[in-house]
Image (tube, rainbow, N blue to C red):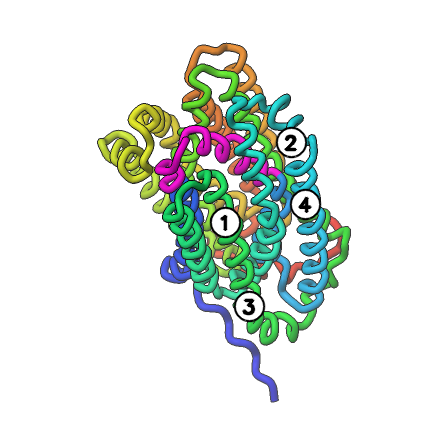
Amino acid sequence: MTTAPSPPPAVTSARILRLWWPLAASWLLMGAELLLFTVFVARMPDPEVNLAAYGSIVFPISLVIEAPIIMFLAMSTALVADGDAYAKLHRMMLKAGVLLTVVHVLVAFTPLYDLVAGRVLKVPVEVMEPARIGLRIMTPWTFAIAYRRFHQGILIRFEESRAVVVGTAVRLVANVAVLSVGFAVGGIAGIVVGTCAVATAVVVEAVYVGWRVQPVLRERVRPAPVHGAPLTRSAFLSFYVPLAMTPLMMLVIQPIGAGAMSRMPNALASLAAWPAVHGFVFILRSVGMAFNEVVVTLIGEPGAVRALRRFCFAATAVVTGLILLVAFTPLSAFWFGTVSGLAPELASVACTALLFAVLMPGYTFLQSWYQGALVHSRRTRAVTEAVAIYGVVAVSLLTLGARWQAHTGIYFAITTFTIGGILQTAWLWWRSRGPMRALGPDSDSVPAAEVAWNGTSPAE
């Protein structure tokens, strides 16, 4: 005699917190990786050039190349409910990882690099060669990210999110180890030490996550019966292609921003201060990014909408208060001057730039809330629409700033990104109203992955 499976526990603030905090901690540790790069490289020879090489070329180009697989985390969280879905999506992950690694190799090891860095982005000439070396060292990055994010999503779906934060801690330890050895040896260019640390750390984390997910695959994924109709290629593409376009369009803006800053006043200082400012803002935004997978996992359960909304608005207020506290007090000078180790002139630029970013952490939480509801309801096209609005606004304003030549590049760029982000958030809110009404404050809808696949998205 078989017994019915016990219902999941109620969606309360405590349950949301238990799922969210390990993911938030994982994102925070990833943000610490950016901070560590700045802290170590700023104390090595020729820091301004090496920081600019990473901030203007290596990091943004690496992100753009990996962009199509960034949403593998949300994809596997939403879709990997059984062995059939896992096998099909695992094959797609491997193919995408290999293909994008080939793209990375072509950019880093062929004349394409000179075209992108020299003619398109027009970075300062002294940055070109250090950035070329760093980009080549980052070759393993893309495949490791694809493998890691795909399997992290499975851990999150089955509420094993603590394994995610342990993996990120392992990554951070590997990063610190390589940075420390390079710093102790001395005489090695900062861009070489820094990118070796980043590439090594992400590979180590991918290996850990691949090992940690095996019990979940063996005991909970492969034995599970197929939910609804089997996952088809057309159903997957209708769900994932709009989702994948989201980070691609977002991240293409990063090198465009670097190119625009290169054409504005105080270019080298802007590019050198960018990793420190971006890294700090990313730390505060990251806890909001972690909320997206929490929403996708829980929003279909009874009572989830009210509990998730309350949690989101409270967290938005907290992170906004934190960045205001730092930006408008001497804490910013302490952070960028003492902790990050920037030279006084760069620290001053970074402190001023932070003032233009104070809205970013708050609207990131709101974006995750609205976007999670859209992903759950399969309306991923609306997510792409929001990012397209962001992209059009950002490119238009950055082009204007590069021609205007009236303001320090980093100040204008961050202001541009903030305006675009606010409009993106507003569009996500508008498009999520239908799904939110359908779910209702006391929704009894089934989890998203149990909806039968018919090869099409729900009506837009």
Frontmost of labels 2 and 4 is 2
Question: What amino acid does circle 2 point to?
Answer: Tyr
- Looking at the image, tell me whether mark 1 or mark 3 is earlier in sequence order: 3
- For disc 2, the marked residue is 113
Q: Is residue 189 left or right of residue 96?
A: left
Q: Is residue 212 visible?
A: yes
* Residue 69, placed above or below residue 211: above
Residue drawn at x 46%, y 50% is 290
Q: Residues within 10 Å of mark 4 (few under 14, many from 20)?
A: many
Q: Is residue 150 left or right of residue 366?
A: right
Q: CA distance from mark 2 to mark 1?
A: 34 Å
Question: What amino acid does circle 4 point to?
Answer: Leu
- For disc 1, the marked residue is 292
* Residue 164, placed above or below residue 435: below
Q: Quadrant of the N terminus?
A: bottom right
Q: Residues within 10 Å of mark 1 (few under 14, many from 20)?
A: many
Q: Quadrant of the C terminus?
A: top right
Q: CA distance from mark 3 to mark 2?
A: 35 Å
Q: Count the numbered circles shown.
A: 4
- For disc 4, the marked residue is 100
Residue drawn at x 61%, y 74% is 218
Our reading of the magenta stretch's main secondary structure is helix
Frontmost of labels 3 and 2 is 2
Q: Residue 3 location in percent, x, y? A: 57, 83
Q: What's the magenta region?
A: 38-64
